[in-house]
Image (cartoon, grey):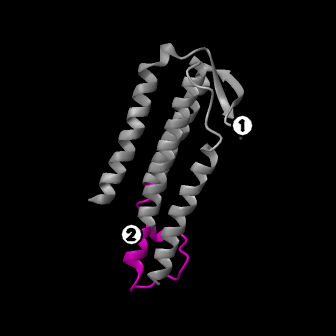
């Protein structure tokens, strides 16, 4: 049930993101940021249609990871899978994929939103802390799940 809830939350974020983008499409300027540098400032600009690239990638990633989460027996685990630990490892593996999927969809939606705000002149860019704030949780979540898998051996 909890796995299904997490997946539905991710799908809700994705659907909300796409709905807001479609709803506000006519208010997006013709020139939008395509890339943000380490400082958080936009350093590459493109046509308004490029603002559809991130939602497209996010949707494909969501779909691929949704399929992937159904096959935990194919994952590469940090410990040997046995009959005794298989159920625990598969559950932890699914949770890792679900968590990563939700995190990526939320991150892409935030970047997309910020890009539109920068194009409208409502924001200057991403915070210089954005990249560390993005990478740290991914390492922490992965580390926690790897540790829990190691303990389940």
Could you tell me residue 151's position as x and y percent? 46, 81
Reading the chain from its start, which is encountered first: label 2 or label 1? 1
- Give the quarter of the figure containing the N terminus: bottom left
Classify residue 39 by image quadrant: top right
- Secondary structure found at label 2: helix
Task: Give the vertical position of 133 relative to 83 (above or below).
Answer: above
Residue at the (60%, 20%) spot, across then down: 119
Above or below: residue 36 compared with residue 49: below
Question: Front-most of 106 and 128?
Answer: 128
- Is 85 or 33 nearer to us in this picture? 33
Please indicate, yes or no, whether residue 71 appears anywhere in the rendered image: no
| Residue 23 in the figure: left or right of residue 8 | right
The residue tagged 2 is 91
Q: Which residues are magenta?
A: 67-92
- Using the image, tell me which numbered label, if any, was put on residue 131: none
Crowding at label 1, few (<14), some or many (≥20) Cα neighbours within 10 Å? few
Mark 2 or mark 1, whichever is nearer to me: 1
Q: Are marks 2 and 1 in contact (CB under 8 Å)?
A: no
Is residue 11 shown left or right of residue 38? Answer: left
Residues under labels 2 and 1: Cα distance?
37 Å
């Amino acid at each position: 049930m909890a796995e299904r809830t997490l997946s539905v939350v991710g799908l809700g974020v994705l659907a909300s993101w796409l709905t807001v983008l479609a709803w506000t499409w006519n208010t997006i300027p013709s020139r939008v940021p395509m890339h943000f540098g380490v400082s958080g400032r936009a350093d590459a600009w493109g046509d308004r249609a490029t603002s559809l690239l991130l939602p497209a990638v996010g949707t494909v990633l969501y779909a691929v990871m949704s399929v992937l989460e159904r096959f935990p027996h194919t994952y590469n685990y940090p410990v040997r899978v046995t009959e005794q630990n298989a159920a625990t490892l598969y559950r932890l593996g699914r949770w890792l994929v679900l968590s990563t999927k939700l995190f990526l969809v939320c991150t892409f939606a935030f970047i997309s939103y910020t890009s539109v705000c920068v194009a409208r002149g409502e924001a200057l860019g991403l915070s210089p802390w954005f990249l560390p704030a993005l990478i740290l949780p991914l390492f922490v979540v992965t580390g926690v799940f790897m540790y829990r898998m190691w303990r389940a051996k």
